[in-house]
């Protein structure tokens, strides 16, 4: 894989020359962004080139030069990233911009020298021109703007906010700038002072391909306050919290849905926005997929009332058992992030769960583990008090030997599975065949001899095959297996002892084009289609969640797909409070399309089962801790098949036996329960 470069321009301005304009959190925002890039980008095939401009260095000329000389180096395959934290403003737009600005105002970035003699802001049209300059070699371009009026381009001093808040808006420049003061290129090889015209007053503003994440709408104010013990922009802090805590490689729209939820809880009248000249680009992976994925972790901190507490509870599969039979977690400093959290040799000790609720668990340090009560930590599960899945190994001797040696090495994930010597006892079988590993359920296939003799549909691989017999491939197989087992634990998650009814919250499916409920069968919903009838034949529906209890409940709707995905973000921000009789549409009422992929049919699955699960409780919990990205679909030999999709992912699976998580008690903090709904999808096969 060729090496790419991420060119980052990070601009933060606290110390504006006019004292009344000064801010306090912009440098912290920029330093947090720099730390994130250094710690979470995949440096094995990526060069990181960061240029920072802080306060007096962030003049208009220096920012423009940094675009021209730093970001413009980015070529195809590279990433250009512009991050700005400071004041935003507005200024009168000349008549030559009437066709672009209905309010007659430019949105601007206030550079360090914008408000001193002869100074000028950087207008949104100029930023567009600079982006166009950077786009010439077709890199992946991202802008993040934490300032007022940033929604279209790009903190208010008399703002009426609590004293701890500042607004990132500078008083506007009152005069109308002459056209030749704008950085508006006719073309990139010519004088950059004037842009070609259409008629006498209309100007063509270049619009290079990019994705823009902004702190607020063009008419809103962006705030900064004290967060996490330091002054920070509310948008920047929320954005970095999502990025740092994410276990997955997120898309831009994934990120912004979550950021909006956090910002709305920390301030008011500030709605972060996302924009791309090509709208499909908002579905691209953040920074073009250069972020290293991280395993799921919980945050550990000291609570004066309860002692040491983690932010995961029984909703997340955390279990309290008897003495020596509870969930155990390894503890890491917050400096350990990303893939390093998989290396338990970097842990500083362990904690054991002593009590659970839906959203939190009380833990106690074990052995010689010492924890600082003023610090926070990250935790990962090392063992759960549930029976391990039984795994049967067979096939080519070399492959089986590598698997067995890897299993005998143990480690934290070893508590999820155990080798069994008989197929009759097994939940899963791991087959070594033709220098590839295959994971399948013990019940799938026509027997060992048939499986070994044929590389066809006699066995049903659950995920993609893993090639080669060595330590790394064996570890990859066990990683896939652990993922599947954890997925099944979420599938079977329930709370038999809850005082909240199991039907307190209902899931309903509606027709795609009319407000009419689809009637379910006794065992869930059934859809069928014939692919020869064209794309309009695919089943479609909308999903609604209804609180039919007499109490206010926090609800999260989760998709458990056949590719072992757990998607907890079907409801806005992952979860929402519903009053009695209140309803909420999944994905803002968008239509969900269901399809069985060609690959699934090739392995004998023309009818498949998918699951929608709603988890609800009396206290808020973090649904994001349940998230699991899908595994790759198995492919038939010598064929490459496109996947079908439900909610943008293939939803074609099998009804599973499941590894049940047995709840030992209902917990003492709060109550919760869950309800699941099956959706069966059948693809009609033509003879």
Image: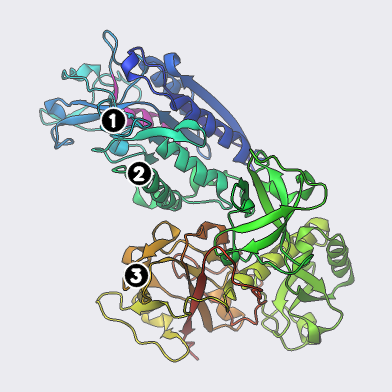
Q: Is residue 25 visible?
A: yes
Q: Is residue 339 above or below residue 382?
A: above
Q: Residues within 10 Å of mark 2 (few under 14, many from 20)?
A: many
Left or right of 638, for residue 62: left
What residue is disc 2 on? 272
Question: Which callout, 2 or 3, points to the residue nearer the camera?
Answer: 2
Question: Which scheme is used to colour this image of the protein?
Answer: rainbow
* Horizontal side, residue 376 vs residue 276: left or right: right
In depth, the one of 278 and 549 nearer the eye is 549
Q: Quadrant of residue 538 in the image?
A: bottom left
Q: Return the x and y of residue 191 as percentages of the image width and height.
A: 30, 18
Write down the region rendered in magenta. 121-140
The residue lying at 53 percent from left, 40 percent from top is 77
Report if the CB atoms under discs 1 and 3 are less than 8 Å apart: no
Relative placement, left or right, of 515 versus 261 is left
**Distance between the alpha carbons at the discs numbered 1 and 2:** 17 Å
Residue named by callout 1: 124
When asked about the image quadrant of residue 376, the answer is top right
Tag 2 or tag 1, which sits nearer the N-term?
1
Quarter occupied by the N terminus: top right
Q: Is residue 109 magenta?
A: no
Residue beneath the point at 34% across and 44% down: 273
Instruction: Please state the horizontal and vertical placement of residue 580, each as a whole percent of the image.
Output: 33, 71
State the image quarter where residue 123 is shown: top left
Mark linked to residue 591: 3
């Amino acid at each position: 894989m060729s090496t790419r470069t991420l060119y980052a321009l990070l601009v933060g301005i606290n110390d504006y020359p006019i004292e009344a304009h000064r801010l306090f959190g912009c440098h912290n925002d920029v330093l947090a962004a720099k730390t994130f890039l250094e710690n979470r980008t995949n440096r094995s095939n990526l060069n990181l080139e960061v240029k920072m401009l802080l306060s007096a260095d962030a003049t208009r000329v220096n920012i423009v030069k940094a675009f021209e000389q730093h970001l413009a180096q980015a070529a195809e395959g590279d990433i250009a990233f512009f991050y700005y934290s400071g004041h935003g403003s507005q200024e009168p737009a000349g008549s030559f911009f009437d066709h672009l600005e209905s309010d007659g105002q430019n949105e601007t970035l206030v550079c360090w020298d914008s408000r001193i003699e002869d100074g000028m802001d950087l207008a949104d049209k100029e930023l567009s021109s600079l982006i166009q300059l950077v786009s010439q070699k077709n890199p992946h371009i991202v802008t993040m703007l934490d300032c007022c009026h940033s929604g279209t381009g790009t903190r208010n001093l008399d703002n009426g906010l609590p004293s701890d808040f500042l607004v990132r808006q500078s008083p506007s420049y009152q005069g109308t700038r002459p056209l030749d003061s704008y950085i508006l290129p006719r073309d990139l090889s010519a004088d950059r002072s004037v842009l070609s015209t259409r008629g006498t007053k209309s100007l063509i503003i270049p619009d290079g391909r990019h994705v823009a994440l902004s702190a607020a709408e063009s008419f809103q104010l962006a705030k900064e306050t004290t967060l996490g013990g330091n002054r920070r922009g509310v948008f920047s802090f929320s954005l970095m919290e999502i990025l740092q805590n994410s276990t997955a490689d997120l898309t831009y729209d994934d990120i912004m849905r979550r950021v909006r939820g956090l910002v709305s809880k920390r301030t008011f009248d500030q709605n972060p926005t996302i924009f791309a000249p090509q709208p499909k680009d908002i579905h691209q992976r953040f920074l073009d997929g250069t972020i290293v994925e991280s395993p799921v972790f919980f945050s550990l901190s000291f609570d004066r009332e309860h002692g040491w507490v983690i932010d995961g509870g029984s909703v997340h599969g955390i279990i309290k058992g008897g003495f020596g039979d509870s969930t155990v977690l390894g503890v890491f400093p917050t400096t350990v992030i990303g893939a390093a959290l998989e290396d338990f040799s970097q842990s500083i000790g362990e904690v054991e769960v002593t009590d659970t609720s839906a959203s939190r668990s009380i833990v106690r340090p074990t052995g010689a583990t010492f924890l600082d009560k003023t610090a926070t930590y990250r935790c990962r599960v090392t063992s759960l008090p549930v029976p391990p899945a039984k795994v049967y190994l067979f096939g080519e001797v070399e492959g089986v030997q590598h698997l067995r040696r890897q299993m005998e090495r143990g480690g934290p994930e070893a508590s999820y599975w155990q080798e069994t010597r008989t197929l009759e006892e097994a939940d899963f079988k791991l087959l070594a065949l033709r220098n590839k590993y295959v994971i399948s359920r013990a019940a799938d296939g026509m027997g060992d001899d048939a499986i070994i003799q044929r590389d066809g549909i006699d066995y049903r691989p659950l995920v993609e095959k893993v090639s080669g017999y060595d330590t790394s491939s064996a570890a990859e197989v066990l990683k896939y297996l652990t993922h599947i087992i954890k997925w099944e634990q979420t599938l079977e998650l329930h709370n038999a002892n809850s005082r909240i009814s199991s039907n307190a919250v209902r899931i309903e499916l509606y027709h795609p084009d009319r407000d009419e409920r689809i009637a379910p069968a006794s065992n869930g919903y059934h859809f069928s289609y014939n692919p020869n009838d064209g794309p309009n034949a695919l089943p479609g529906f909308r999903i609604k969640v209804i609180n039919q209890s007499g109490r206010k409940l926090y609800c999260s709707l989760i998709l458990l797909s056949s590719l072992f995905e757990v998607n907890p973000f079907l409801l806005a921000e992952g979860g929402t409070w519903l009053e009695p009789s209140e309803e909420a549409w999944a994905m803002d009422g968008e239509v969900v399309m269901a399809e069985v992929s060609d690959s699934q049919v090739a392995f004998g699955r023309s009818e498949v089962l998918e699951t929608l699960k709603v988890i609800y409780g009396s206290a808020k919990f973090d649904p994001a801790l349940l998230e699991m990205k899908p595994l790759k679909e198995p492919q038939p030999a010598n064929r490459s098949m496109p996947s079908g999709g439900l909610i943008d992912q293939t939803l074609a699976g099998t009804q599973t036996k499941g590894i049940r998580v047995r709840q030992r008690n209902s917990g003492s903090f709060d109550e919760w329960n869950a309800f699941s709904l099956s959706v069966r999808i059948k693809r009609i096969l033509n003879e």
